[in-house]
Image: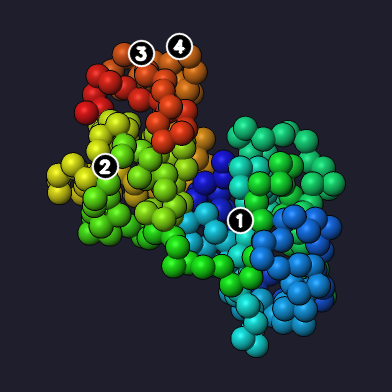
Amino acid sequence: MPEILEIEMYRQLAARVEGRLIETTFTPDDWYLKGTNATQLRDAVAGSVVERVARHGKLLLIELTDNRPVLGLRFGMTGRLLVDGDAAIETLEYSSDRNDAAWDRFGLVFTEGTLFMRDPRRLGGVELDPDLGGLGPDAWRLTPEKLASSLAGGRGPLKARLLDQKRVAGLGNLLCDETLWRARLSPHRRSADLSSAETARLCATVHEVLDELFRRGGSHRGDLHEERHGKGICPLDGEPLQREKVGGRTTYWCAAHQR
């Protein structure tokens, strides 16, 4: 957490700052700035206006006027966004329930209002002109053709391929498990071995999961989520769930119907 759904919630909240003038930046944590420093970043953005807030996968993009660099905000596992003191998400799954301003790692101070990144574990970061060329297609805009291209040649497990942001941008551990469970595909399948029909089904299921769980309120709202524990039972067929490491991530899946 957060995954593509949470970043989309951040994007919708951050749209509030479109048209605002940046007065200065809040940069108390040099480590949080990637490939730049506090002075360079402030000089790059101060005095410009936020033209548009966009998103690609898990990356939030703040586009500025006057040909200024694009600000790229990455939230890691525990980062939250606050605009004018309002949070898009009050607490994140697997993060602290505390709400401590000491965890504010970066901020934009406008002539009216503020935008802050609050990140207890400091796993996110801020950069100028992030390289989108290193990311795969946005998961919410996948087509069967784009997905087939992303899976092609993959000899590793399907779940690892879906988690690779260079192949598909935006999916994290919870969304991958929910999607593969609904698509009836084993996380261990070789990604290159999927048939065209299976790839089309997987693509349709990605869209179904993203749309439905966004309406429900986040990546942790899947049908499988409540059974992510040692004695979990498949909600579809009542069989015990398998708990394994796949692609380096704890994975829950049902061997009875995921093939």
Decide if residue 122 is on the left or right side of residue 144. right
The label number, if any, that marks residue 155 in the structure image: 2
Viewer-side label of 3, 1: 1
If the image is split into quadrants, where does the C terminus sit? top left
Return the residue at label 1: 74
**Amino acid type assigned to the residue bearing label 3 in the image:** Pro
Measuring 77% from the left and 62% from the top, which residue is drawn there? 107
**Amino acid type assigned to the residue bearing label 4 in the image:** Lys
- Which one is earlier in the sequence, the residue at label 4 or at label 2? 2
Viewer-side label of 2, 3: 2
Viewer-side label of 2, 1: 2
Secondary structure category for the residue under label 3? loop
Is residue 21 in sight in this rendering? no
Return the residue at label 4: 231
Decide if residue 140 is on the left or right side of residue 182. right
Measuring 55% from the left and 59% from the top, which residue is drawn there? 59
**Amino acid type assigned to the residue bearing label 1 in the image:** Arg
Measuring 80% from the left and 55% from the top, which residue is drawn there? 29
